[in-house]
Every structure is written in C-alpha cells, then in structure tokens.
C-alpha cells in the first residue's frame, strides 16, 4: 500500500510497536517507520504505553490516518488521544478466537468504528460473509490486498543451488507461519494419500507437533524447510508444481501466499472459507478450491494437477493475469489514493475548507 501510494505522491509514515528497547525511527523506500517498544501481548493484542504520545505527535503531521483492524489497542489509543483527522480502516479479519474477550471489547470498538470515515474490506467474499461488517455496509468499500510485480525477487545462484540440492522440483509448496488455522494436518494426510512431494516453508507454534505427526505417518515425501530467506522462497515458488494453502478457519482472511503463487505463475489449491482466499483463487480458472479439513478433496486436487500438466500450466498463466488485473500494486495503490483524496475532501467540505 505504501509503495504504491507513494508513487502517486502520498507521503507515508508507519507507526507500530516492535521488540525494541527504545524509540526507533528509520526510512524505507515506502515510508518512514516509527517503532515504539512493545511491552505486552495479552490475547495476541500488542500494547505499548508510549504509543499514546507518539500517536498524537504523528497525527498532527498527517492529513489522514490509516489503521489496520483488528488491533483493539489502536482503538483505545485513538479514542483517548482525541485525534480529529479522517480515519481509513483496512478490515483484515473478524475476531475469531477470542469470542469471550470480544464481548468486553465491543463497546470500545463501537465508539471507534463510529469515528472511522471509511472501512475497507479486502475482498467481496469477506464483506458478504462477515456478520459484523454487515452493520457498517454504508461506509464499507472493497479494495483487495496487493502485490507489485516488481516485488518478485531475482534469486542468487547460491539460493538456486540450495533449493535444487535439498528439495528438487515438482513439489507442492506451502509457505506461511505454522499456526492452528493453516490446515497443515490436512496437508500431511493428503501427502500420505498421494505420496507426492510436499515442502512446508515457515516456522510457528505448530511446528514440532506437525513434524511429530509427519514422522509418525512415515512421510518421507514431506520436507520442512523452516524459515527461509526471500531469495530461497522465490526459488521454492519457481520450482514448485503448485501452491497449497489448506487453511481451514476464518482466521485466514485473505492469504498473501496465494498472491505470491499468482506472481510466480503457479496453480493454487485453497479451501472455501467464505473469505478472500476464494477471491484470490478462482476455482477452475487459477486452481482448485476444496472443502476445508478434507484430505480426500485436497488429494484429488493435487492428483488433478499432476495428471493434467497442461491444465496446471494454463491455470498458472491465468493466475498471473488475475494478479495483474485485480491485485497489482498499481491497481491497489490507485484505489487507496482515490479513497484518501475523497476522505480528506469530505472533511474539508464539512469544515468549510477548500
């Protein structure tokens, strides 16, 4: 978002919490980044008390504030700071797992959402399936997440040699953090049923349990690559037969890995969750969409891509074209740029300014 809008003349600053001991400010091509110390993370909600003063300071500089939801602490910071600037919110996901805590958070959220100028859902699928967003349709727009074709990495010779030696080619690739909702148990079961090579790249809280399951199932066709560098990841996408993204809960709201698969011209396999995953992956055109937590359907989709290589190649080409038309940095950047301009203009009209 920042890279694409900056090319249109927007100046961006990113205010965030990070594991730093003191305030850290540095410049990147897309934005000036301001990192405040992260102090606590109860229920996966990042908190840092210095954010209150920093938020007021940065808000004075800004014409418009762009927040990303869910982050309940950001709601609190905005309300207590009494900042009066137009607010754009990108709504990434419903609160799925912390349903009990959500009841206590609901009044704070309602106050914050009333002050938000416009809400952006990242796919029409999510807007349609989110019960909560249904109450804010009057100020919700759809702009997907994007990926610039310039983001495609040119791998080093060393990275290519490493992947070729350790993983070969023609495998089914998963890339992501190994979390409970990623559906990797289903992928392991499908690997058992098909015998096809599978590479799982990433680390996370489910790693050791998944490795133990793979060992128990005797899956010598499954390799865990761990955390990989950007150039190694690029080679993995190049060498893969297809990208498998078997997430099985609504916590998976979009799936940027699917965009990376489109960028590299690979067919996709994902699950129907009523979220953006089925917006990125158009069933039958860019790949297959299967039922969540269904190893049989996942196995059949994998077999189809192996059996009909010509169709798999055509799906990969269609995926790249879909990326260019719907998810490119240029398309997403222009959409946000227009949204920013309109939000600022609306405030100016109300205040009597030109």
Image: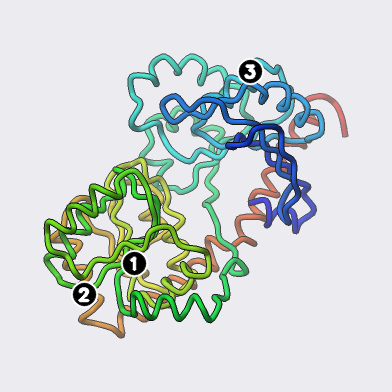
Residue at 31% x, 66% y: name it: 199
Q: Which mark is residue 4?
A: none
Q: Is residue 343 left or right of residue 139?
A: right
Q: Position of residue 306 (x, y in %)?
A: 23, 79
Name the quadrant containing residue 244.
bottom left
Ranked by sequence position, the earlier of labels 1 and 2 is 1
Q: Position of residue 67 (x, y in %)?
A: 61, 35
Q: Which mark is residue 79?
A: 3
Instruction: Determine whether the residue tagged by mark 1 lies in a helix, strand or loop.
Output: strand
Q: Judge depth for marks 1 and 3 and give the one in front.
A: 1
Q: Which mark is residue 304?
A: 2
Q: Judge depth for marks 1 and 2 and give the one in front.
A: 1
Q: Position of residue 110 (x, y in %)?
A: 51, 19
Compared with 327, 135 (above or below) is above
From the image, which quarter does the C terminus lie in? top right
Q: Nearer the viewer, residue 257 or 124?
A: 257
Number of marks present in the image shown? 3
Q: Contact (CB < 8 A) between labels 1 and 2? A: no
How far is mark 2 from mark 3, CA to CA?
52 Å
Q: Residues within 10 Å of mark 2 (few under 14, many from 20)?
A: some
Q: Is residue 104 left or right of residue 342?
A: left
Compared with 45, 92 (above or below) is below
Q: Nearer the viewer, residue 167 or 318?
A: 167
Instruction: Determine whether the residue tagged by mark 2 lies in a helix, strand or loop.
Output: helix
Q: Residues within 10 Å of mark 3 (few under 14, many from 20)?
A: some
Residue at 35% x, 66% y: name it: 243
Rendering colour mode: rainbow
Q: Is residue 64 left or right of residue 172?
A: right
């Amino acid at each position: 978002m920042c890279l694409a809008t900056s090319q249109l003349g927007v100046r961006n600053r990113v205010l965030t919490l990070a594991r730093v001991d003191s305030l850290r400010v540095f410049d990147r091509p897309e934005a000036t980044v301001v990192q405040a110390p992260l102090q606590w993370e109860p229920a996966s909600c990042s908190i840092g008390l210095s954010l209150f003063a920093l938020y007021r300071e940065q808000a004075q500089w800004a014409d418009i504030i762009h927040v990303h939801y869910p982050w309940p602490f950001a709601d609190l910071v905005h309300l207590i700071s009494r900042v009066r600037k137009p607010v754009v919110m990108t709504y990434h996901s419903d609160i799925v797992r912390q349903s009990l805590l959500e009841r206590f958070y609901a009044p704070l959220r309602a106050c914050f959402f009333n002050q938000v100028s416009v809400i952006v859902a990242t796919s029409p699928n999510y807007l349609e399936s989110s019960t909560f967003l249904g109450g804010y349709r009057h100020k919700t727009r759809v702009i997907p997440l994007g990926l610039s074709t310039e983001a495609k990495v040119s791998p080093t010779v060393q990275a290519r040699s490493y992947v070729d030696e350790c993983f070969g080619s023609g495998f089914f690739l998963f890339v992501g953090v190994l979390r409970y909702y990623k559906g990797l148990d289903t992928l392991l079961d499908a690997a058992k049923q098909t015998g096809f090579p599978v590479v799982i790249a990433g680390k996370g809280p489910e790693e050791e349990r998944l490795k133990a399951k793979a060992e128990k199932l005797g899956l010598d066709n499954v390799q865990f690559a761990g955390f990989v560098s950007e150039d190694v990841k690029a080679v993995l996408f190049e060498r893969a037969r297809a990208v498998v993204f078997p997430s099985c809960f609504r916590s998976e709201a979009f799936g940027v890995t699917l965009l990376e698969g489109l960028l590299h011209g690979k067919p996709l396999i994902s699950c129907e969750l009523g979220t953006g995953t089925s917006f990125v992956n158009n069933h039958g055109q860019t790949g297959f969409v299967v039922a969540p937590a269904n190893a049989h359907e996942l196995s059949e989709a994998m077999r189809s891509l192996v059996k009909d290589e010509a169709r798999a190649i055509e799906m990969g080409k269609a995926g790249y074209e879909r990326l260019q038309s719907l998810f490119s940095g240029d398309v997403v950047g222009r959409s946000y740029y227009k949204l920013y301009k309109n939000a600022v203009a609306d405030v100016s009209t109300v205040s009597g300014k030109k």
